Amino acid sequence: MSKEQLRVFSGIQPTGNIHLGNYLGAVKNWVDRQDLYENIFCVVNSHAITIPQDPKILKEKTYELCAMLLACGIDPKKSTLFIQSEVQEHTSLAWLLTCITPMGDLSRMTQFKDKSQKNPKNIFAGLFNYPNLMSADILLYKSHLVPVGEDQKQHIELARDTAIKFNRDYGELFIVPEPLIQSEGARIMGLDDPTKKMSKSSGDKPNHLIALLDDSDTIIKKFKKATTDSEGIIAFDKERAGVYNLLTIYQCFTKESKEKIESDFAGKGYGDLKTKVAEAVIEGLKPIRETYLKLTNEKEYLQKILKEGAEHARSIAQATYKEAKEKMGLI
Ligand code: AQP
């Protein structure tokens, strides 16, 4: 299909520090496919407040993440980039969708279960309703494809169900979106515990994640401490999660085949593997860090991109929301 026919939407939360999982599972794929589709990318700050945030830090992190996405290669000439709270139709449509989504569907969401377990004293209704805001994000833009990591698949399935239900009950309006999940890097695991997804909210554990802004020494140190096993064989074996995770990260950066990587590492030890992975990551992240540092001095440029992005996004979102509201009988 041609670019005109397919629209991509995806978002990322400005919580904590953007890490290798976010980059390989989502952002790198947004960047690599920019020429193929019409792209809309969003820093989803309204999602971030489903967990309590310091307002001042949230604001800073929001702009930092926007700059980081540009540094990663989001090109404003090819993609629309904006901040979610600048387009109020996201929360407006989320309310309409909340009114047609069964509680039972929301309570099945594994992310709600995980996050409420991590923060048992701070479980708010917004966290429970988060998937409806995500459905609104996607459906507002009549998006065909949603490039995400594997952890978001369940939410996209819900967005699909919601679109189908709305179209059936109120008349055809939404495109039923498809997730776009990479075969490699869709689930990068924590370096300290490769049975758990690398996650911003576990960033207080010192060797859990590689942040995109980590310097070379920190990256080497973290990889050196990565959890492996005692088998000593370097192979893409999913049963050995630590080594598999390191090899996956290496493959994402080097773009070499699994066979070539395994043969290159044949007879080598985990020390060699960790050094090589760290080097590939340092090399891959270097231009991102350099561009990011330049962009932090270009605040006006960033504001201009975000203003234009929000204007473009708003024009699409307003039209869709108006139709949705009218179809539901709201004046
Ligand atoms: N470990 C991961 N591997 C691959 N992809 C990942 N993503 C997140 N973690 C991994 C993908 O990154 C995109 C943006 O995610 P997000 O910031 O909106 O929220 P998240 O999925 O909840 O990410 P985190 O890091 O785990 O944040 P916290 O700890 O705040 O919840 C999504 O496409 C996601 O799939």
Image: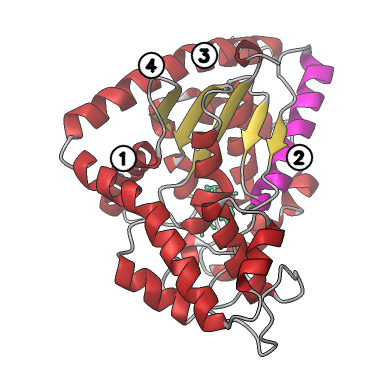
Image point (48%, 57%), residue name = 20
Please say if the residues under marks 2 and 1 sit with CB atoms less than 8 Å apart: no
Along the line of sight, which residue is nearer the eye, 6 or 313?
A: 6
Q: Which residue is mark 1?
A: 67
State the separation of the CA atoms marked 3 and 2.
Answer: 23 Å
Which residue, as the protein is rendered here, is positioned at the far bottom?
230
* Residue 236 location, quadrant: bottom right
* Residue 78 location, quadrant: top left
Residue 55 lies within the magenta run: no
- Disc on the earlier residue, 2 or 4: 2
Residue 163 lies within the magenta run: yes
Please say if the residues under marks 2 and 4 sit with CB atoms less than 8 Å apart: no
Please tell me whether mark 2 or mark 1 is closer to you in this view: 1
> Which amino acid does the dot numbered 4 rest on?
Glu
> Which amino acid does the dot numbered 2 rest on?
Glu
From which residue to which does the magenta span run? 150-170
Image point (32%, 67%), residue name = 216
Q: Position of residue 260 (x, y in %)?
A: 66, 60
Please say if the residues under marks 3 and 4 sit with CB atoms less than 8 Å apart: no
The label shown at residue 316 is: 3
The label shown at residue 157 is: 2
